[in-house]
Amino acid sequence: MKIKLLILLSFCCYICYGQKHKTNELIYEHIQKPIVKLDRSWEYSIKVNQSNRDELLEKQKAFEETQKYYDEIFKKEMESYNNSKAAGKLLTGKPERKIAKAYFFGSITDTDLLENTISIEGFNKGEEEFVVEIVLEGFSIISNVKVLDEKKSKRFYKTTFVNPIMVNVKDKSNNTLWNKSYFSENGEHVFLERSSDEPSYEMEKEWKENKISLLKGLEDRIIKEHINTINEDINDNIGYPNKTLELTFFGAKGKKFDYSEIENSITKIKKAFLVLKSDNEMANKLFDESKEIWLKELSKKDIENKKVRINKKIATGLYINLGYVNMIQNEFKKAKEYSLEAELIRPGMGVLTGESMKLKKQIDFFEKRSTGNSDEVKY
């Protein structure tokens, strides 16, 4: 009976004093600053080089010459066959065209197509004030192995490959501005996955007949995928890409207290995000007004008493709000201070803890990109 009474009293307290945070998921649209800052007036060009291109051309030429030699022999044999009498034809049999032994030596890449894939946001293509040189160091097959999986239910061919690519960004004086190597680790791809109940020789025959085309298709796809990844990374490091970031801002709710000012501050933040690109001055005014409301409310906090108007949960949310807005305004010292306050008082696990941890990471991310970059981003 006593236990039931305690539960009932606790529930009544929650109804009467159930003031807690209220989440608002907002989208922050912004132009991301680069890690490496280049002159925004510079124009760029893209150059993609396939380092083993000459070697591939030689192999292709050798393959074609071998086939040409076989075809010349076949032509002569057919002429002789056609000029023979019926008995001679029957004796020698009709000649068969010999096909040069096919093997995978790599594809000759369309570098012009790849060059048009790369686009750096915030800069225009044109004069070569800086050049992005992408060197394809050679797609290579390391091994092709027929595999029976651990459960012995499937067979497949596993291809191990490597596709190293080097990127150098240089100014017109050939000074290196940024560089990075990619994909030096081995990659894997699975072909012809079949049930282990199917005859193994059928899969082997299919592999033999289609191996070259499958590997060429793999190379083409991997190079395109890798170039797209590199394009994203180049923009992440030296470009000014448009980004969207979902941030949680915290209001407050409860039956006993009035939280209209806090809710009004959230409305201001929503308006600030809407006008941020078109009217930076108005957005900052709304940010500052919201911060003033939150600081005023936090002056009344009591983190030891959950029944008060500004308790631990609501205070944590307001500190997170302050952290995000100061981060957006490039006030990183203050943002870190408010992030620390939120971390110190946050109540256990839950949305407040998760957003507090996210805030800390985002401050580090944005500050890294603002270090040595004093120019405001122009929308």
Image (cartoon, rainbow, N blue to C red):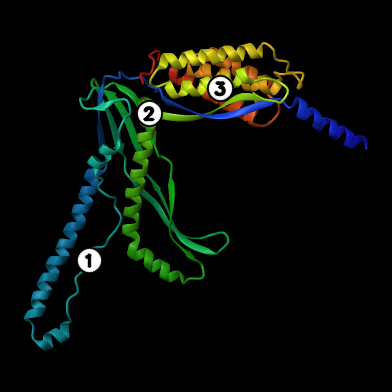
Q: Mark 1 highlights which residue? A: 99
- Residue 48 shown left or right of residue 345 in the figure: left
Q: Which residue is outermost to the left?
A: 83
Q: Which circle marks residue 266 in the picture?
A: 3
Q: Position of residue 337 (x, y in %)?
A: 59, 14
Residue under the point 35% across and 48% down? 221
Measure how far apart labels 2 and 1 are at the Cα level: 51 Å
Going from N to C along the chain, the mark reached first, 3 or 2, is 2
Q: Position of residue 107 (x, y in %)?
A: 27, 50
User: How far is disc 3 from disc 2 in space, using C-alphas?
Assistant: 27 Å
Which residue is nearer to you in this view: 35 or 66? 35
One can see residue 297 in this view: yes
Q: Closer to the camera, 76 or 204?
A: 204
Separation (CA) of disc 3 from disc 1: 74 Å
Q: Which residue is mark 2?
A: 241
Report the amino acid beneath label 1: Ile
**Residue 363 visible, this orientation:** no
Secondary structure beneath label 1:
loop
Crowding near pointer 1: few (<14 within 10 Å), some, many (20+)? few
As drawn, 191 above or below 137:
below
Q: In the structure shown, which secondary structural element does the residue marked by tag 3 occupy?
A: helix
Is residue 265 depicted above or below 146 in this figure? above
Left/right of residue 344 with respect to residue 157 in the rendered view: right
Disc 2 secondary structure class = loop
Q: Amino acid at mark 3?
A: Ile
Query: Quick one: label 3 or label 1, which is nearer the N terminus?
Result: 1
- Mark 3 nearby-residue class (10 Å; few <14, some 14–19, many ≥20): many
Count of numbered circles on the image? 3
